[in-house]
């Protein structure tokens, strides 16, 4: 297994997060469940067994090292979020470590703004190496700005 685990979700889930605390918790839950469900769909394509969707969902959660308190409720939310955003074309990923910091620890509004800006920029840049170099340049210039 890779050293780092990333949760991949549609950037649309960020909509409305800054407005209130409830939206932040909802965003984190939906991003987590979407990631697990999307990964379980990848497992569906790779196995020949007659597993049920919820069994694959549970297997995907274990692979991503996530313990779910209420499997049925998590699956229900995940399936709903997944199909609500099935036409999404813009995705972003977030490392498991950063995700759990925001999930478990109290973060300031500034921390949330930084996370959301980071995710927005990351979704724009994508995998394009030239854009990554440009963003690094602007970041270094910004650090030197008084």
Image (spheres, rainbow, N blue to C red):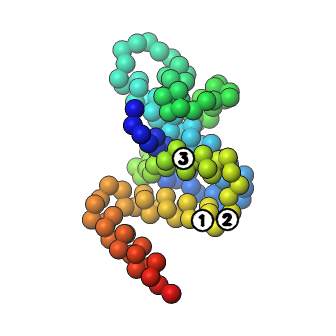
How many discs appear?
A: 3
Dot 2: what SS?
helix
Nearer the viewer's eye, disc 3 or disc 2?
Answer: 3
Identify the residue position indicated by label 2 in the image.
109
Callout 2: 10 Å neighbours few (<14), some, many (20+)? Answer: few
Check disc 3 and report the residue beneath it: 97
- Give the SS element for disc 1: helix
Measured Cα–Cα span from mark 2 to mark 1: 6 Å
- Residue highlighted by disc 1: 113
Number of the front mark, 1 or 3: 3
Disc 2 to disc 1: CB gap under 8 Å: yes
Identify which residue is drawn at 62% across, 35% down. 77
Dividing the picture into quarters, in which one does residue 68 lie?
A: top right
**Residue 2 image position (x, y, % from top left):** 39, 37
Q: Considering only vertical position in the picture, is 60 above or below 81?
A: above
Percent from the top left, x then y, of residue 146?
51, 87
In the foreground, 19 or 6: 6
Q: Is residue 23 above or below residue 80?
A: below
Q: Is residue 85 above or below residue 67?
A: below
């Amino acid at each position: 297994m890779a050293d780092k685990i990333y949760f991949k979700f549609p950037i649309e889930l960020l909509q409305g997060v800054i407005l209130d605390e409830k939206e932040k918790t909802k965003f984190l839950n939906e991003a987590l469940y979407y990631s697990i469900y999307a990964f379980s769909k990848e497992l569906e394509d790779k196995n020949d067994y007659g597993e049920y969707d919820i069994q694959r969902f549970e297997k995907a959660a274990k692979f991503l090292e996530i313990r779910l308190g209420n499997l049925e409720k998590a699956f229900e939310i995940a399936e709903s979020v997944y199909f609500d955003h099935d036409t999404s074309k813009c995705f972003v990923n977030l490392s498991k470590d950063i995700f759990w910091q925001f999930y478990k620890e109290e973060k300031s509004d500034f921390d949330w703004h930084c996370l959301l800006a980071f995710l927005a920029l990351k979704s724009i840049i994508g995998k394009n190496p030239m854009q990554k170099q440009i963003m690094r340049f602007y970041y270094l210039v910004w650090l030197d700005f008084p």
